[in-house]
Amino acid sequence: MARPMDAPVLVRAINVTKSFHGNQVLKGIDMEVRTGEVVVLLGPSGSGKTTFLRCINQLETIDGGRIWVDGDLMGYEDKGGVLHRLHDKKIASQRRGIGMCFQRFNLFPHKTALENVMEGPVQVKKTSKAEAEQRAIELLEQVGLGDKPAAYPAQLSGGQQQRVAIARALAMDPKLMLFDEPTSALDPELVGEVLKVMRDLAAKGMTMIVVTHEMGFAREVADRVVFMDGGVVVEEGPPSEVIGNPQHNRTRAFLSRMRQEEAAHGRPPTTVDLSDVPAE
């Protein structure tokens, strides 16, 4: 699903660092994501993938470096090379252009699927209720839930709740979608319905950064795979290279574990020559 690599850069991260309680989780991340590109972040737990996503939309503040989204320096104003933290209202305004879907769906339990999708446009963008409702109906149709507008989250399966969460994010007309392991909390039989919605978004040109262990999705949909470990980017490139012919032992060892998990779950194996993966 290759896209033209002369598209403008939408996300640019330079030397991003982040620590928690003295533990450096991001150790100088450099990354660019172009408009319409789908980038999948792979790596073991604790490698910094989720933290990096949360830094992009300022759910976490960075300790060093800079992140731009569509030309905006996220969370800060640069005055003569010195960064000054923006006010919360300005940061919230920056976030409006970024949709994010989490492992947990974070839906309002007391609101219907339709009301959950309408909430952001009405409360944040001050869209009229009639317009927001029409758009929400369209989005629920888009994610395959056109028959569930009146359902409450407790009446929906995990896969359906995650699809409502995606529709809710799309209702804000984001320029960028961030997915943090959106299928990890789902029963295996429900994973496919969420991945289908994500595939459809990619086909329509949505710029996406996806943290996932779903290797099939990475192989089929990603324009670029970035393998992270220990807070650094170990290697990156097209899926055919990073998954199909990894150059680093850390990548090979990780993919070996993924292949074992896929086999245990009856999924198609990750295609990669693992003959010289060092014994763990």
Image (cartoon, grey):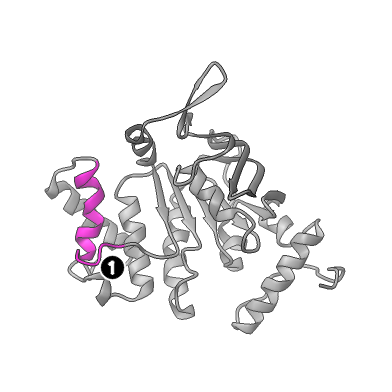
6 versus 2 height, above or below: above
The location of residue 211, given as percent across then percent down, is 55, 58
The relative height of residue 227 versus residue 64 in the rendered view (above or below) is: below
Outermost front residue: 21
Left or right of 159? Residue 113 is: left
| Quadrant in the rendering for residue 103 | bottom left
Check the image and report above or below for 58 versus 228.
Answer: above
Mark 1, Cα crowd under 10 Å, few <14 / some 14-19 / many 20+, is many
Q: Main secondary structure of the magenta part?
A: helix
What residue is drawn where x is 37% and y is 44%?
Answer: 174
Q: How many marks?
A: 1
Q: Amino acid at mark 1?
A: Leu
Q: Residue 23: x and y, percent?
A: 64, 51
Above or below, 168 relative to 182: above
The residue at which mark 1 appears reads as 145
Q: Is 113 a magenta residue?
A: yes
User: In the rendered structure, does residue 90 fall within the stretch colored magenta?
Assistant: no
> In this view of the protein, can residue 245 be seen by the observer?
no
Quadrant for residue 136, please give it: bottom left
Determine the residue positioned at 17% across, 53% down.
133
Left or right of 68? Residue 119 is left
Q: Nearer the viewer, residue 35 or 211?
A: 211
Q: Which residues are magenta?
A: 107-124
List x then y, in percent, for residue 106: 34, 62
Residue located 45% across and 42% down the image? 58
Residue 100 placement (x, y as % from top left)? 41, 52
